[in-house]
Image: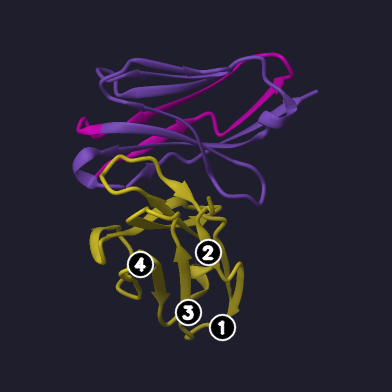
C-alpha cells in the first residue's frame, strides 16, 4: 500500500511569489492535515481537511490556505511568500475520525530567497 | 489552546542503556498522545501512541506511560541501539480538536556504540 505522497520534494521561490504544494493520502484515508516544520518553531499545525471541508485551523496568517478534492487529495497554497516561510511542509493522513493515527509524507522543502 | 513541553532537548546514551523522554501538556481535555521518531532527512514515523483510558503501553523495547492527574507522559526506550538515534517528538490532542496535534519541541537522541 502506497504511503502519503507529497510533491514536489524541493521548491525554491523568491519573496512575493506564491506556491502550491500537493499531497496524496494513503488510499482510503479521508483526513489530510498539514504541518510546518522549522528548526526554531518545531512542528506546527496548519489545517486539517476532511471530506473536502476544513475541519481545523492553526494560527497561521490568511496567506496560508488549502483545499481538498473529492478523491481526498489535498493542496496547500502560500501567497506572497516571505523569507520566514522557508520550512519543511509535511502532510499527514488518517482514516476519518479524530485521534486516529496520523501517517506523514516525506514533506516538501520550501526555500524562499 | 494546548501546550506541550518536552525534556530533555538532547539525550546521549551508551548503547544498551535506557533512554527516557518526558512531556507535559496543559489541556486536561487531551486524550490522545502519540510519539513520533524522525531520522535525519526523513518523515516523522509513529512509533507508539496511548489514549487517556490507558496508563501504560509497551511495544518490544518501547513503552509509554501516562499520568493524567499530573498531565505528563513519558517515552521509555530500553536496550538502546545505534539505530535508535533520531529526533523524537511527543504530541497531544483533545478529541474535539480532530487531528490537530500539538507537538513538543523534540528530543535529539544519540546512542553511542
Q: Earlier in the sequence, mark 2 or mark 1?
A: 2
Q: Earlier in the sequence, mark 2 or mark 3?
A: 2
Chain B palette colour: purple
Local SS, label 2: strand
Circle 2/circle 3 CB separation < 8 Å: no
Respond whether the residues carrying marks 4 and 3 are from the same subunit. Answer: yes
Local SS, label 3: strand
The numbered disc on residue A71 is 4
Respond whether the residues carrying marks 1 and 4 are from the same subunit. Answer: yes
Circle 4 marks a residue in which chain?
Answer: A
Work out whether B44 lies above or below A92. Answer: above
The numbered disc on residue A111 is none
Circle 2 marks a residue in which chain?
Answer: A
Respond whether the residues carrying marks 2 and 3 are from the same subunit. Answer: yes
Which chain is tinted yellow? Answer: A
The residue depicted at 66 percent of the width and 52 percent of the height is: B41
Label 2 to label 1: alpha-carbon separation: 21 Å
Circle 1 marks a residue in which chain?
Answer: A
Label 2 to label 3: alpha-carbon separation: 14 Å
Residue range corresponding to the magenta coloring: B1-30
Label 3 to label 1: alpha-carbon separation: 10 Å
Does the stretch in magenta take in B14?
A: yes
Q: Which residue is mark 3?
A: A19
Amino acid at each position: 500500500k502506497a504511503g502519503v505522497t507529497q510533491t514536489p520534494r524541493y521548491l525554491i521561490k523568491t519573496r512575493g511569489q506564491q506556491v502550491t504544494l500537493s499531497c496524496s493520502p494513503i488510499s482510503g484515508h479521508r483526513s489530510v492535515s498539514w504541518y510546518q516544520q522549522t528548526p526554531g518553531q518545531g512542528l506546527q499545525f496548519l489545517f486539517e481537511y476532511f471530506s473536502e471541508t476544513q475541519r481545523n485551523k492553526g494560527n497561521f496568517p490568511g496567506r496560508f490556505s488549502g483545499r481538498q478534492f473529492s478523491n481526498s487529495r489535498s493542496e496547500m497554497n502560500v501567497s506572497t511568500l516571505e523569507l520566514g516561510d522557508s520550512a519543511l511542509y509535511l502532510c499527514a493522513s488518517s482514516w476519518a475520525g479524530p485521534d486516529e493515527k496520523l501517517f506523514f509524507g516525506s514533506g516538501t522543502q520550501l526555500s524562499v530567497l | 489552546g494546548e501546550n506541550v513541553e518536552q525534556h530533555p532537548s538532547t539525550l546521549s546514551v551508551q548503547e544498551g542503556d535506557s533512554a527516557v523522554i518526558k512531556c507535559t501538556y496543559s489541556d486536561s481535555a487531551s486524550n490522545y498522545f502519540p510519539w513520533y521518531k524522525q531520522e535525519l532527512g526523513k518523515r516523522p514515523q509513529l512509533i507508539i501512541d496511548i489514549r487517556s483510558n490507558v496508563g501504560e503501553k509497551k511495544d518490544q523495547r518501547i513503552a509509554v506511560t501516562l499520568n493524567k492527574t499530573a498531565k505528563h507522559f513519558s517515552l521509555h526506550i530500553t536496550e538502546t541501539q545505534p539505530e535508535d538515534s533520531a529526533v523524537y517528538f511527543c504530541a497531544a490532542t483533545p478529541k474535539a480538536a480532530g487531528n490537530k496535534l500539538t507537538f513538543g519541541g523534540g528530543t535529539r537522541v544519540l546512542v553511542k556504540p
